[in-house]
């Protein structure tokens, strides 16, 4: 992420000679990584996506990987809300809802 910001800064300031944009926060946000569950490896199966999407301010970003394994990063969730406390509460609910498993459990 830091590298991306450096590239954006370089393009905006050096090449295009544009002023920097505002850094003022628009809404508080929390990000969760979606990792493969321990004990599962194989074709990916997601649990809790529909329930999570029903929560206002939740955006799910799946990376399109077809195979999961323990602790493999499969995507992330961004939660925005009017207050940081509310965003954290929603993120905690999502954390318990979404599980990244496979169709076959490994031992």
Image (spheres, grey):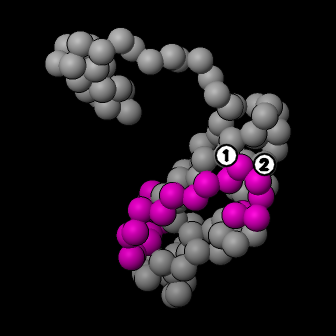
**Badge 1 vs badge 2, beta-carbon distance below 8 Å:** yes
As rendered, which of 76 and 69 lies closer to the eye? 76
Residue at the spot 31% in from the left edge and 31% down from the top edge: 4
Q: Is 59 one of the magenta-colored residues? A: yes
Q: Give the range drawn in magenta.
A: 52-74
Q: Is residue 82 visible?
A: yes
Residue at the spot 30% in from the left edge and 15% down from the top edge: 18
In the picture, measured across the screen, residue 76 lies left or right of residue 4, that is: right
Q: Quadrant of the N terminus?
A: top left
Q: Which residue lies furthest to the bottom in this view?
A: 104
In the picture, measured across the screen, residue 53 lies left or right of residue 40, that is: right
Secondary structure at badge 1 equals strand
Q: Can residue 96 be seen in this view?
A: no
As rendered, which of 66 and 9 lies closer to the eye? 9
- Looking at the image, is 81 positioned above or below residue 63? above
Residue at the spot 75% in from the left edge and 39% down from the top edge: 81
Secondary structure at badge 2 equals helix
Q: Which of marks 1 and 2 is nearer the N terminus?
A: 1
Residue 98 falls in image quadrant:
bottom right
Q: Where is residue 84 in the image (x, y as percent from the top left)?
A: 76, 31
Q: Position of residue 41 (x, y in %)?
A: 45, 77
Instruction: Tell me how far mark 1 sits from mark 2, CA to CA.
Output: 7 Å
In the picture, measured across the screen, residue 9 lies left or right of residue 106, that is: left
The circle on residue 90 is 2
The residue to which callout 1 is attached is 79
Residue at the spot 72% in from the left edge and 57% down from the top edge: 94
Q: Where is residue 24 in the image (x, y as percent from the top left)?
A: 59, 17
């Amino acid at each position: 992420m830091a590298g991306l910001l450096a590239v954006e800064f370089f393009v905006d300031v050096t090449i295009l000679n544009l002023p920097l944009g505002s850094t003022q926060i628009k809404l508080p946000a929390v990000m969760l990584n979606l990792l493969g569950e321990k004990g599962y490896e194989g074709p990916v199966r997601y649990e809790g996506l529909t329930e999570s999407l029903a929560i206002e301010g939740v955006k799910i970003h799946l990376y399109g990987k077809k195979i999961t394994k323990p602790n493999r990063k499969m995507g992330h969730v961004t939660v925005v809300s009017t207050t940081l406390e509310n965003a954290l509460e929603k993120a905690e609910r999502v954390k318990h809802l979404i599980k990244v498993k496979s169709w076959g459990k490994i031992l």
